[in-house]
Image: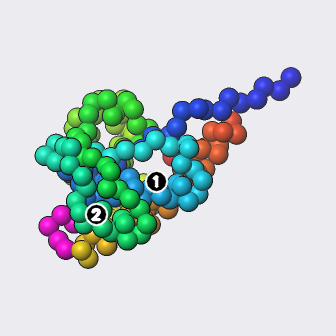
Amino acid sequence: MRVEPQKSTLPRSVLFVCLGNICRSPLAEGVFREVLVTRGMERNFLLDSAGTGGWHAGSAPDPRSIEIAARHGIDISGQKARKVSREDFARFDLIFGMDRSNVADLKAIAPEAAQGRIQLFLEFAGDPSREVPDPYYGGPEGFASVYRMIREASEAIATRLDGRVAASESGHASSTM
């Protein structure tokens, strides 16, 4: 008698983290969601974003992030900034820091069991030599550059995670992580 593998009903969960949760991480959340929707994968994932600091808690994303996202057909205007919470380390399968400082800050507060879930966003996407720079003090060209980095990385990560979701649904293990 053949036993069918159980399908996981729990979504994969991804948290995007930057310093204040108003520029890079809300943009990454919105772009990654759009990539998942385009690929028909959105039902498999829970997405959120947060900051290592709480200065902007409750604020909408930076208007320049909203504008660059809107220029590409993505609405992030309804997001609200928040600070990373202790619960996030249990709730999310993957926690992406936008730069090495974000990753270090996250690892400093994360419980031991969550350390392996914290990754540098671009490194996980296959580019270990770069970080997503904070465009806050620059102009629109910095936000456009950050958008392109995030879009390319989101496509690469979605491809990588698509293999994990397909493998888990088929009952086969995956070594893509």
Does 21 lie within the magenta span?
A: no
Q: Is residue 44 above or below residue 25?
A: above
Amino acid type, label 1? Arg
74 and 159: which one is in front?
74
The alpha-carbon separation of the residues under discs 2 and 1 comes to: 15 Å
Q: Which mark is residue 33?
A: 1
Instruction: Indicate the amino acid at tag 2.
Output: Ser
Residue 113 picture quarter? top left
Q: Residue 162: percent from the left, percent from the top?
A: 58, 51
Q: Which residue is mark 2?
A: 65
Q: Nearer the viewer, residue 69 or 165?
A: 69
Type of secondary structure dominating the magenta stretch: loop
Tally the numbered discs. Answer: 2
The reply, left or right, for residue 116 in relation to residue 158 is left
Way the structure is coloured: rainbow
Q: Quadrant of residue 22?
A: bottom left
Locate residue 38, reporting x and y percent. Answer: 56, 60
Q: Is residue 118 visible?
A: yes
Which quadrant holds the N terminus?
top right
At 44% from the left and 56% from the top, the residue drawn is: 32
Q: Is residue 52 visible?
A: no
Answer few, some or many: residues within 10 Å of disc 2's Cα (few below 14, many 20 plus, some between 14 and 19): many
Label 2's element? helix
**What residue is shown at x 25% (from left), y 39% (from top)?**
84
Magenta residues, as a range? 133-139
- In percent of the image, x 27 and y 46: which residue is there? 80
Counting from the top left corner in percent of width and height, residue 130 is at 32, 64
Q: Residue furthest top?
A: 1
Determine the residue positioned at 68% across, 29% down. Answer: 6
Decide: marks 2, 1 in contact (CB < 8 A)? no
